[in-house]
Image (tube, rainbow, N blue to C red):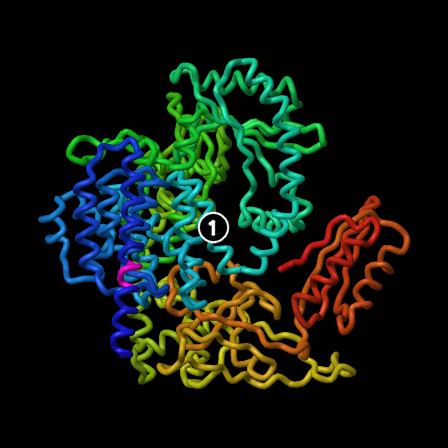
Amino acid sequence: MPDDFDNNKEQRRNQIEAKMVDDAFQHLIKTYLASRHRKKVDIITKAFNFARQAHKGVRRLSGEPYIMHPIAVAQIACEEMGLGSTSICAALLHDVVEDTDYTVEDIENIFGQKIAQIVDGLTKISGGIFGDQASAQAENFKKLLLTMSDDIRVILIKICDRLHNMRTLASQPANKQYKIAGETLYIYAPLANRLGLNKIKTELENLSFKFEHSQEYAAIEQKLSLTQSQRDSLFEDFTGPIRKALDAMGIEYQIKARVKSPYSIWMKMQNKHVTFDEIYDILAVRIIFTPKVRENEINECFNIYIAISKIYKSHPDRLRDWLNHPKANGYQALHVTLMSRQGRWIEVQIRSDRMDEVAEQGFAAHWKYKEGGEITEDDGELNDWLRTIKEILDDPQPDAMDFLDAIKLNLFASEIFVFTPKGEIKTMPAGCTALDFAFEIHTFLGTHCIGAKVNHKLVPLSHKLQSGDQVEILTSNAQHVQPSWINFVSTAKAKAKIQAVLRRENREIQKQGEDILTSWLKQNDLELTTSVLDRLCESHDLLKHESLFLALGEKTIILGDGDLEALQQKGQKHSSQGGWRRYVPFLSRDKKKEEETQPAKAPQRFTVDKDFNRKKPVIITEENFSNFIFPHCCHPIPGDDILGYIDNKNQIEIHKRACPVASKLKSSFGNRILDARWDMHKMMFFDATIEVKGIDRKGMLLDVSQVITSQFNVNIHKITISSNEGIFDGSIELRVHDRDEVKIIMDNLRKVKDLQEVQQIL
């Protein structure tokens, strides 16, 4: 009887799941049929049935049938990116070669060369996004960018895949959540932004923020909800007169409220050191119109601008014309900031319906395909960017992280427009120099550049360019690449070319250095081993073996007796870990004697072995605190969102989740990331620094010190105050138990009369 019951239950579950899968696929087909693509339903259905059979019996961590993931990725590709049948088929099949016995050849025989080529590209950059192999994310990213230049759809589908993984990230253990969220913020969100996928970029950022800083995310969401009615009222009052003006002009339009995303709000709070209530640009307004004549849409944008600037006063320095000079990701719009009747500046974005589609869906919205599936390369800006990436890829970097950093320079950069002597416009990243521009034109110009003329005036290589500059590069055959150049170039292309030349020159010097080291070790009856190199690097504060060889070859390091001593102290504990100083907090268990210090014992570090469970959180207590490494890059204290990282010595570093160093670690060494949590009981003291600024007055210092000393068990360690022309400026170093105490003190300081700014120095 129980067997029959179990069988019926199993059958019932299978029926429910089969219906769920069929419904999801029918929704995909319905969305596809409503699009402007040619209706190739047969091949999509064929791909779905093939993938369903291939993944039969396999489940995701969430418990649902695996086929739901490829359907969801295809749905995103179709509905949110506007892609067609080739991309939908590739999305449905994207995990088949990776996870089953089918090969790329099988896919090509059944579905044709183009779909097989995209699936092959997706397979090469996979390696199991939730598996241990995903730690080589930087290397995967290189492969991903290589495949981009063959077919942009590979990266578009990969972003769809990442978006669905982020939407279903709750089923993953915490350490995997931090790793995947970190990769997403470091790689995929800027990449989506660079491709103009604004909506997807925003969602990727918000989901990453939600999983890495859940409390802050929830707090901002709550505050947005509580202030919704105020924004609605402001929006209605502000847009009422605009609607009347547009109606009178006979324009077909819609006006939307654009609310700043939780992630953007949080970033502004961090960067500007302000509270939620001090952010005034949470609301923006978007006017989307259908032009009467498509060729005249830019003029119509300006006509709308003229009409609304008669209603409200516009900010003279905040007009952004992306119409005549679109952003490199294809974005076009006219941005103007107007003063509302409530005394608030509000940004208005004016764009046509076509521009709006490109803004939301990016290059996918206007990427054209020829018959037979070949790409029509008619997007000059995108191809320029792909060419830059290809040049960087052509010169293999020894360090994947260097490569990632170089690409990110181009992913994140805002743009300026620079003219050649003949009047040709070049789009360059903001903050670029004359030397960057030289390398952008041609590698020969860059390597032999001796200076430039900007607007007909002679300037050095390091001169920073501004939008509208006209630049002429001056060269000399006698000029060679200088190591100092790397310090002032900012584009990925220039950095890559300079590093390539320097590496070629350095290889010979490194070889000489290696010979010197081998000879010296032989004289002292020692062998050249990895552990010997590691110890010498640490004693000379170098991170890489190549740096040691180079220094020896250049004679900036001369080996001597001190090096022999360093090699003989095999068990020595080092205070430096990868160039970071050990952060030792102030510790006091006796409240009356908290200023007393005791001789520090060498800490006994915890070492991760093969039996260590990486899925379980690491709990940090007063008893085991000294077992972990706290690098100086972010100084985490109890109350901070943290994670663990297993270093090269199998010891555990603790970082803030928002730490820039941790961002790189999550992206490149994802399988070494651990969930870490505090379990502290206000027995240890940590350093925290608060900066204050305000109008100076009598009794100000007394009021500030009273706020701090009224907080139980918080001590002022050091206070620095200056007053200049009536402005009070101060820095207060405290010893606190946790982040909550810092927050309480800052909240109370903000209530002090005439104190204008209160911020924590991290």
Q: Position of residue 223 (x, y in %)?
A: 63, 50
Q: Quadrant of residue 13?
A: bottom left
**Where residue 138 appears, x then y in whole percent?**
34, 57
Whether residue 693 is visible: yes
Q: Nearer the viewer, residue 314 or 47?
A: 47
Q: Pick the residue in front: 324 or 344.
A: 344
Check disc 1 and give the amino acid type. Glu
Q: Is residue 689 left or right of residue 253?
A: right
Compare residues 490 and 104 and report the one nearer the observer: 104
Left or right of 718: which side holds 114? left
Residue sitting at 67 percent across and 85 percent down? 598
Q: Is residue 330 above or below residue 675?
A: above
Element under label 1? Answer: helix
- Where residue 471 sits: x, y (%)? 43, 28
The residue pinned by badge 1 equals: 205
Which corner quadrant holds the C terminus? Answer: bottom right
Q: Position of residue 575 (x, y in %)?
A: 52, 76
Residue at horizontal 42%, vertical 85%? Answer: 570
* 563 sits left or right of 691 in the view: left
